[in-house]
Image (cartoon, grey):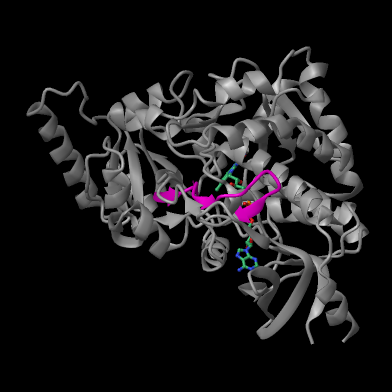
Amino acid sequence: MAETFDVIVIGAGGSGLAAAYSASEHGGRVLVLEKRPQPGGTTGIAVGSFTAAGTSIQRQAGIDDSPELHIEDAGKFPPPAIEARNADAMRAFFLQEAANTFEWLRGLGLSFVGPSPEPPNRNPRMHNVVPGAKAYIAALQLGLQRRGAVLLTNASAESLIKDGDRVVGVRAIVRGETHEYHASRGVILAAGDYASNHDLIAEHRGEQFRCIEGINPFATGDGHKLAKDAGAWLVNMDVTYGPELRFVPSSQRPFQQCFPASGAAARVMGAIAPRLPKWVMRSMIKRLLVTWQHPENSLFDDGAILVNREGQCFVDETKYPDREIALSAQPEKIAFILLDRRLVERYSAWPHFISTAPDIAYAYVADYLRLRPDIARSGDSLASVASQAGIDVAALENSVKSYNASLGQTSESKQPLESAPWVLLGPVKAYFTTTEGGAVVNQRMQVLGHNGNILRGLYAVGQNGLSGMILWSHGLHIAWAMTSGRLAGIAVMSESARPESVDLRAN
Ligand SMILES: Cc1cc2nc3c(=O)[nH]c(=O)nc-3n(C[C@H](O)[C@H](O)[C@H](O)COP(=O)(O)OP(=O)(O)OC[C@H]3O[C@@H](n4cnc5c(N)ncnc54)[C@H](O)[C@@H]3O)c2cc1C
């Protein structure tokens, strides 16, 4: 027999947990279904920046800012062709609400450092949660537990249950068995993006992008599929963040996850962090920069080359997205970046860095050699770096020879790769970071059909309910995940409960 809740949330990433917590705060009996063995989703592997204007932390820092100014600046981030497609009104509504969400999260005990500048934002607006984005998950999960919500893991939502034109529940596979759950007030889609759904990527972005992976291999667009099946209007499905080159993650536990994300230790850390000198925070956060960050394109403009697992050059590494497409067709979909002495020296000090997160810190060659020995090796010969990486020595030497010879025949300003020390960085892979397509929703996060009609009983948040917004700049995806979740929780609990569900409960 189906169990009935007020609200069912599909997905226990950032937006889903925010929606569930918000609904339970407003008195709802909430069920969260999470397909993975633990909550977190892409939010759990993110850096954790949250960009908002008019926050208490800005005021403490003497920054006079407002959502209105943020609304003006937000439109300056995307290239004009992308900005022309942005949903201005929804973005303005979101940015008006972001600071309220930020204070709501601080109320849950989360601590932030910053705000940091990120031009063309005219004021510093980027707040970074301490110790990392896992803290959002831990704080919301703890809050949910306190409020008695039910969170089922290894529970994959497969389809929506409808009564007439209203969504009234979810069919899910929970630990191998099919179960039905009813929602008397609403179902909230919070299942993240489709960066790892090769069919959706090929359909909307183009067949040549099919083989490129998403950073989160479980971001398979389940929420988009459920929304589409229910008649939702999905927009901007061809807009993606990436593909771009990124270093593969370390097999060791990510640095930020070594810190406590909940409990007394996390609270102590949260209290201390904002008082630490900036250089201490920067050197700690620098480790984050060598975890998921992407190598700067300037490396290739300056003459670094990309070779595949067999030591061969395979593409003009300065051309985007040809580089990413070609890389995804190489053996194991991996490549390595080769630097000679000139480049090693150049990428050892500002303003030439291997990777960064704006205004947090910059990572140079020496940082990679020290913090990521699994993906960075140096040597006094090409043979030395090639053998350390398990690459064919003769092939790498030939590639360098051919590359140097090719320079003489072009008018490019690049210089030959000549002398030791050599540094070989990688593997790098081409990844989609996230996707920007989603269901159109109204300001109550209710999903709309193609005619603008409300699909009763169905809500979408986070990457499922982007509603035409293309969130260029750092810190807006998490701000949206949390804001849309908070607002959906309030909205769904203001719906009157379906009388039928009383019968269901009685049965
Ligand atoms: C490396 C990296 C760093 C980033 N850093 C930042 C940052 O610092 N700031 C920022 O603003 N943005 C950042 N982003 C983007 C941001 O993290 C995400 O866009 C945002 O957190 C997505 O939240 P979400 O709730 O929509 O999805 P998710 O957090 O991915 O949650 C979706 C959840 O739904 C579950 N799920 C999926 N399908 C089902 C199903 N059928 N049944 C049940 N459960 C299901 C998933 O397992 C997952 O737990 C980063 C992204 C990446 C990849």
User: Between residues 487 and 184, which one lies in front from this camera angle?
Assistant: 184
The quadrant the N terminus occupies is bottom right
Judged left or right of residue 336, residue 56 is right
User: Between residues 369 and 66, which one lies in front from this camera angle?
Assistant: 66
Residue 334: give x, y in percent of width and height: 36, 54
Above/below status of 16 relative to 244:
below
Judged left or right of residue 7, residue 296 is left
Judged left or right of residue 269, residue 168 is left
Q: Could you tell me which residue is drawn at 71 percent across and 42 percent down?
A: 483
Number of on-image labels: 0
Q: Is residue 252 visible?
A: no
Q: Could you tell me which residue is drawn at 62 percent across and 45 percent down?
A: 46
Q: Could you tell me which residue is drawn at 68 percent across and 55 percent down?
A: 13
The question of residue 330 being in magenta is answered with no
Q: Could you tell me which residue is drawn at 84 percent across and 65 percent down?
A: 497
The question of residue 443 being in magenta is answered with yes
User: Between residues 170 and 65, which one lies in front from this camera angle?
Assistant: 170
Residue 419: give x, y in percent of width and height: 27, 30
Residue 244: give x, y in percent of width and height: 40, 43
User: Between residues 249 and 417, which one lies in front from this camera angle?
Assistant: 249
In magenta, the rendered stretch is 428-447
Give the residue at the far left of this rendering: 409
Q: Quadrant of residue 469?
A: top right
The quadrant the C terminus occupies is bottom right
Residue 187: give x, y in percent of width and height: 71, 64
Q: Is residue 255 visible?
A: yes
